[in-house]
Image (cartoon, rainbow, N blue to C red):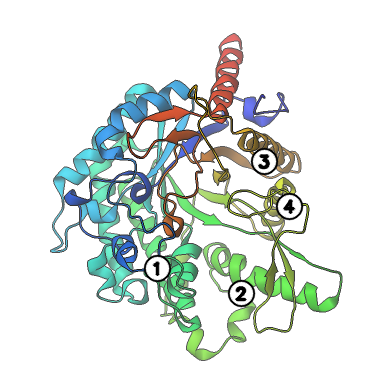
Amino acid sequence: MDIIAKLGSPFSKPDFTIGVATSSFQIEGDAEHREKSIWDTFCETPGKIADHSHGLVACEHVKHWESDIDIIDALNVDAYRFSVSWPRVIRQDGSVNDDGLAFYIGLLDRLIEKGIRPYVTLYHWDLPQYLEDEGGWLNRQTAYAFEKYAEVVVKAFGNRVYSYATLNEPFCSAYLGYEVGIHAPGMVGKEFGKKAIHHLLLAHGLAMRVLREHAPTIESGIVLNFTPFYPASNEEKDVIATKLAHDHHNDWYIKPLIHGEYPELIKHIPNAHKPDVHPGDMEVISESIDFLGVNYYTRARVQDNGSEDPHQMPPAEGKETTAMGWEVFPQGLTDLLVQLHRDYTLPPIIITENGLASDDEMTPDGQVKDLQRQRYLNSHMNAVADAMAQGVNITGYFVWSLMDNFEWALGYEKRFGILYVDYDSQVRTLKDSAKSLQAMLVKRKALHNQG
């Protein structure tokens, strides 16, 4: 099955970036050579990880990074998006771990040697535990610690990086980590979530200023995850609940970045839930960005069922779902992108994550026939092309994920990769989706060469 149905789509153009993505804690392993992170602590807490696993070994990427880059190179992608582990770079005493920096510099140099553009994310959820011990993202000082960390990384990496993202999915860090507690550090309380996100966004703005100073020619931005919300019915109460869900889970994160203010919702939430906004904060948070990274996986239908919060309904009976139980709904990606384009004046958008978990199994002859993933990628790439046809400026698309890995609170139960990882042997095997993507990119390269 060919991954792209619309051969004339923007995906075939040479200036459209196609890549694969990973994150540090999910693949690196080598925990003995870094500081402890909040995810190490979370994994040690009974009942937090579905399969009782941890990220101490993961995919041993620190050990196998050279062969992993060879695989990325063989896929013919334009770019590789990965994150830097803050605990691998800055020690508890504030000193720099030169060996940790050297690992990433070696990675960057090899990517450049292969002609693969490095897209670097500075923070993908693995906060050093020593900072969490001081309050984590509920402590304003963590934003300034991030500013210093960003400066160390950016100055060390020099001109090796093609694109920087400050944060990945601050919604997950703030809401899942500090409000509902299903991610590290596992705090629960509505009085925490919006305070945490304010400090995360402040950290982003401070880091953007560091990037402007020390890497002025490198494109820099932020990655947000979005869920398009649809009312379960045309009843007014469901429509109102849907708008409320959108304000809480989408606009609360993007509006401060683009407009320098929180949604009107801030006037209606209890004072105890409001962030502590200092004079000048919103100017820092709304520092201009060169791109907006958009992560998309599924949609949500919303119902006002009488509870305090909008009720997000499970997928309707008969709808195709992923191994996560998420509805496969490519139209949601088009709708989301068009809505963002309509509501905000945005810089170019990059689809920084898109993919699914499926119940992948290896056949006796070593094949992984992940047909659902091929269908998913095909339909969602076409959804991106449809949004571009409606005027949305999108410059790239990254498949999540390069390889099966530690899937946070779900441990190793869910496989998102286009590479199958045998966690006992650490052998990587190209799934059929990887082979299909590879074939598409070979054809694309041939077309470019002919041109």
Q: Residues within 10 Å of mark 2 (few under 14, many from 20)?
A: some
Q: Residue at x 32, y 26 (%)?
A: 67
Callout 1–callout 2 Cβ contact below 8 Å: no
Q: Is residue 276 above or below residue 178?
A: below
Q: Which residue is mark 4?
A: 335
Q: Residues within 10 Å of mark 4 (few under 14, many from 20)?
A: some
Indicate which label's residue lies in the foreground, 2 or 4. 4
Indicate which label's residue lies in the foreground, 1 or 4. 1
Q: Which mark is residue 380?
A: 3
Q: Alpha-carbon distance for marks 3 and 2?
A: 29 Å
Q: Which residue is mark 1?
A: 47
Near-viewer residue (208 or 439)? 439
Callout 1–callout 4 Cβ contact below 8 Å: no
Q: Is residue 386 above or below residue 116?
A: below
The answer to which of marks 1 and 2 sits earlier in the sequence is 1
Q: Residues within 10 Å of mark 3 (few under 14, many from 20)?
A: many
The answer to which of marks 3 and 2 sits earlier in the sequence is 2
Q: Which mark is residue 127?
A: none
Q: Is residue 320 above or below residue 362?
A: below
